[in-house]
Amino acid sequence: FPKVRNITRSPGGTFSLDVHHFSPEKITVSWEVIQPPSSTQPHPIESTIIITQNQDRTFNATSTCESLRGLINENEVYVVRAVVEHRKLKHVKRREWRSDDKDTKDLLARPEVGMIRIPKLFVNKHSQLQCTISKFYPDELTVNWLMKEKGKKEFPTTNSERYKMPDSRSQLQPDKTFTHTALLEFTPLLEDVGSEVICRVSHPSLKEPIERTTGPLQVLAKPELQQPIQLSVTDSGDVVGCLTLINFYPQDITVNWTCNPIQYKENMPENKVIGNKNGTFRLESQYKIPGKLLENTEFIMKVTWKHESMERPECREISIQDQDFPWRPRIEDMSPLILQVGQETNVTCKVSSYFPGNLRVTWLEKRGKTLSVLKNKSSKYRIPDIEHERMDDNSYQCSPSLSFTPTSDKEDLEFICRVEHPSLEHPIEQSTGPPVINGEFYNRNKCIFQNSHCISNNKAELC
């Protein structure tokens, strides 16, 4: 015959009943709760049953009812009843368990408080701290967030311009406990470095609140690029690249310089870190290379920096053909072409602000629509070698020139100065324009330009 044991209580408001040595296997165990005990309308409870077979071919069964959480009033006495039915029993067997005032606390479940989830905190950037609290019952949870500044006492945070505690509802779980996500939104300041944020959790199941802390806060400030790479030339002809990063925290930062295409790395950069009044830092990094490296049209100077506040390194680069390259040659002060038969004529121009010094100047002669390149060594034209002069910023300037003695003043002639440099994708040019003959400009349309008027066919017209 089935041996029906007494009801046993498990933590969390669940109950179980064992039935031993019965056969055949089929058996029914049903559960109900009665509250108050005098009620004539018991409330059925869901349950599960596990049946195992013994060596003597009889069976054992353990029936467990669902948790009473949410089914009863925890502050009133109640009765749990199990009813067993089996073919070998003449009558159903009943077992009861009765609570008292102390037993009602058995439904309580202590909260499990996870560690505070801390994202990367950035100065003046909205951030959210998160603490997950689970496995508690009933849903009577109190959460307080506190700030403990370095070397000072903690103080509670309240909803304000700086601190926000969004409402968050507890979620009922399958085991009839609750899970709650506590949130604190705030805007970190650099002064918060070393401070702690505390999440304090209170619940009826706890004698003392449970606390979790962030530990000393680390607040970051991402480096800001003050300006693109700045280049300068030293008196010895070396080129110095300078990068300035500002407003970063903490101080440690890594900077690497490289030059392509030859991967020049012989010199180490000079890095200077300066503390600002607001607690952030400023970096000035300089990298010196031989100026001759810039003679390669594929030259690129690249700087890469990495800081704790950055997800990945950042970089900037400058090539000799970038629009921002500071030493692109300019042609200026082209002299007019003055023709006087039998007298030497000089044509000069000024090319300035270029570096490096491998500048190529070509003179071209234009007669009508015919364009020809003048050779440096010619019986007709004298073209001196270029002499590079240093400017105040150590870039170069020069004054290319050519001279010749005209044999006619009726020539449709002009000269063009063409300049090539590694910093130029295409050559630049400057023309003398039409020649000046006896103080007047030669016009291809047989028109004489003088004093901004055009004289043609004996009729004056404003040009």
Image (cartoon, helix red, strand yellow):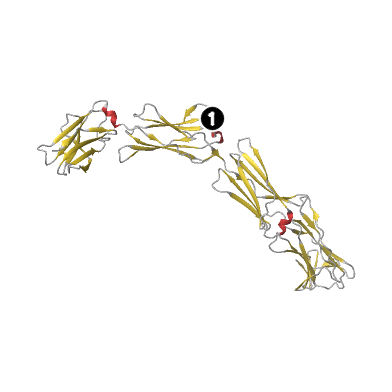
Q: Which image quadrant: the N terminus?
A: top left
| Residue toward you, 254 or 356 | 254
Location of the C terminus (image quadrant): bottom right
Q: Name which quarter of the figure residue 261 lies in.
A: bottom right
Farthest residue to the left: give it: 90
Q: Which quadrant would residue 221 be assigned to in this image?
A: top right
Residue drawn at point x = 59 percent, y = 44 percent:
223
**Residue 349, placed above or below residue 60:** below
Q: Residue at x 76, y 61 (%)?
A: 359
Can residue 294 be seen here? yes
Callout 1, which amino acid? Lys
Q: Residues within 10 Å of mark 1 (few under 14, many from 20)?
A: some
| Side of 115 where 299 appears, left or right | right
Which of the pair 361/43 is nearer the observer?
A: 43
Q: Position of residue 332 (x, y in %)?
A: 77, 59
Q: From the image, tell me which residue sits under label 1.
A: 150
Q: Residue drawn at (73%, 54%), measured in percent from left and top?
A: 291
Q: Is residue 336 above or below residue 444?
A: above
Q: Is 31 left, or right, of 106 in this rendering?
A: left
The percent position of residue 329, horizontal first and vertical second, equals 74, 58
Q: Is residue 123 visible?
A: no
Instruction: Determine the residue located farthest toward the front in the rendered image.
Output: 55
